[in-house]
Amino acid sequence: MASIKEIKTQITSVVNTKKITKAMEMVAISKMRKTEERMSSGRPYSEIIRKVINHVAQGHLEYKHSYLETRKIKRIGLIIVSSDRGLCGSLNSNLFRKVLFKIQNFTQKNIPCDLILFGLKSLPVFKLCENNILSKITHLGEHPNILKVINGIDVLLKKYQIKRIDKIFIAYNEFHNKMSQYPKIIQLLPLSRIKSETISTKRWDYLYESESKLIIDSLFKRYIESQVYQSILENIASEHAARMMAMKTATENSTERIKELKLLYNKVRQATITQELTEIIAGASAVSTG
């Protein structure tokens, strides 16, 4: 059985750990709220530009964009969005498990995968795929720089345009609420059209002030950039929510552990006092009978 001193040391250690986890929980709550606001404000833009793209795609375009072209899959691109830091439960591991399963399915069909990695936590997981990693983007922080994001994915988009990649996916954690975040893999390219009853079956075309090719190129590129940026914001919000829950659980476990250690401390202290009293009584009896 542990001594009283050892138990007191353990109690002190757990109390200090509880203070740290509680502080981290409060920080995660604050960061999650701010990131959730940015994420929510970006969703309407992403949704509207997606509808605009779909509307343009319904028209009779003289210029057929490569982003709408469906080709035979010989090589794919995969953008993986993870966090820079840990202590967020199984958030990253669930995402990586889903991504690795996806890569394995394509590998079995002899379809190689080129990767774009966001976040430090993805680097060791995909170390064996080093030859297929096109770029690594880390330390985006709480306010991701849009230019840094664009530069990171640009090499993949260029490979798609010259037909060296036939399909592009993005994997990230989608934020639902502070209790629920789900790993998600969606297809970025080629663009899939929205199925909606509000879109007419008729065809049309637009009049462009500038050359239609330049406008459509710019519009499609902005769409992809907005989708990737929104996915990163979703992942950051998910990270803070997962960390908040992980630290809350750790704090609750610390509280329970402190109760257990205090109970053990009292039992050991009581046993020690009982033993000392027994020894005193035994000694007194020996003296009186001697």
Image: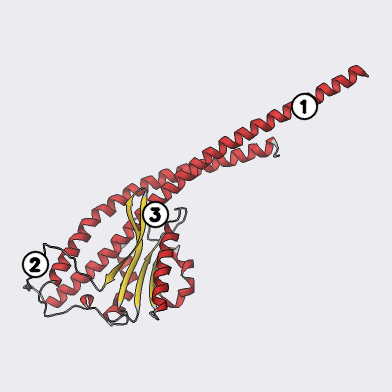
Instruction: For mark 1, give the secondary structure.
Output: helix
Q: 18 above or below 129?
A: above
Q: Amino acid at mark 1?
A: Glu
- Identity of the residue drawn at 22% across and 70% down: 192
Quarter location, residue 57:
bottom left
How busy is the neighbourhood of tag 1: few (under 14 within 10 Å), some, or many (20 plus)?
few
Q: Residue furthest right?
A: 290
Of circles 1 and 3, the one toward us is 1
Q: Looking at the picture, how far across and down is residue 260, in whole percent?
A: 59, 36
Q: Is residue 144 visible?
A: no
Q: Which residue is mark 3?
A: 239
Q: Would you say the residues marked 1 and 2 are in contact, meaning their CB atoms lie under 8 Å apart?
A: no
Dot label at residue 200? 2
Number of numbered markers: 3
Distance (Cα) linking label 1 and label 3 = 54 Å
Element under label 2? loop
Residue 27 image point, x, y percent: 41, 46
Residue at left 12%, top 62%?
A: 197
Quote the CA–CA distance across marks 3 and 2: 40 Å
Q: Which mark is residue 276?
A: 1
Q: Are marks 3 and 2 in contact (CB under 8 Å)?
A: no
Closer to the chain start, of discs 1 and 2, is 2
Instruction: Please rate how many residues cluster around mark 2, counting C-alpha atoms within 10 Å: few if below 14, some from 14 to 19, many from 20.
Output: few
Q: Nearer the viewer, mark 1 or mark 2?
A: 2
Q: Find residue 110 and report its horizontal and vertical position in percent.
A: 40, 81
- Mark 2: amino acid: Ser
Question: Residue 289: percent from the left, percent from the top?
Answer: 91, 18
The kind of residue tagged 3 is: Glu
**84 with respect to 159 (left or right):** right
Please give left or right for residue 21 compared with residue 39 in the image.
Answer: right
How busy is the neighbourhood of tag 3: few (under 14 within 10 Å), some, or many (20 plus)?
A: many
Does residue 251 appear in this view? yes
